[in-house]
Amino acid sequence: MISPELLSILVCPESRTPLELADANLLADVNRAVAAGRLKNKGGEAVATALAAALVRTDRVALYPIVDGIPILLIDAAIPLAQLTNPSNGHG
């Protein structure tokens, strides 16, 4: 996984907000929305694969997937978390 030293310097590429590992509850919520076909990333692409791990902004606005142990810190890869509470919001 991500070392504490690396995690301490990672920030959102868009807002510079610090990032932290997403907890199991948030990942479960995200993966339920993925299974229901309700999530799109900031680039407008449907999120089709469940996430085993992710980084979340400390303000809980967006989530960045971790794929094969590598954080995908691209603005378009961010998953706006407002979609979890507003299913009709298909774009971020």
Image (cartoon, rainbow, N blue to C red):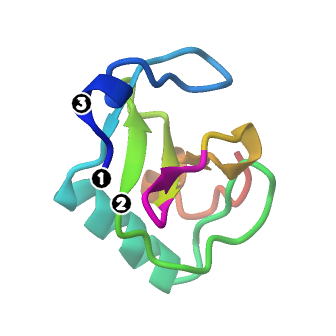
Mark 2–mark 3 distance (CA, rounded to whole Å): 15 Å
Residue 51 in percent (x, y) is at: 42, 69
Q: Check disc 2: other Cα within 10 Å, few if <14, some if 14-19, many if 20+.
A: many
User: As drawn, is 68 to the left or to the right of 47?
Assistant: left
Say which of marks 2 and 3 sits in front. Answer: 3
Per the image, the residue denoted by label 2 is: 53
Indicate which label's residue lies in the foreground, 1 or 2: 1
Q: Which residues are magenta?
A: 67-72
> Callout 2, which amino acid?
Ala
Q: Quadrant of residue 24?
A: bottom left
Q: CA distance from mark 1 to mark 2?
A: 9 Å
Which quadrant is the C terminus positioned in? top right
Mark 1, residue position: 1
- Secondary structure type for disc 2: loop
Residue type indicated by callout 1: Met
Residue 85 to residue 35: above or below: above
Q: Amino acid at mark 3?
A: Pro
- Crowding near pointer 3: few (<14 within 10 Å), some, many (20+)? few
The first of marks 1 and 2 along the sequence is: 1
Residue at left offset 48%, top offset 45%: 63
| Crowd band around label 1 with a 10 angstrom C-alpha radius: few (<14), some (14–19), many (20+) | few
Q: Is residue 70 magenta?
A: yes
- Answer yes or no: do the residues labelled 1 and 2 have beta carbons within 8 Å? yes
Residue 47 in the image: state x and y as whole percent: 62, 71
Residue 82 forms part of the magenta stretch: no
- Label 1 sits on a secondary structure element that is loop
Foreground residue, 8 or 16? 8
Secondary element at image label 3? helix
* Residue underneath mark 3: 4
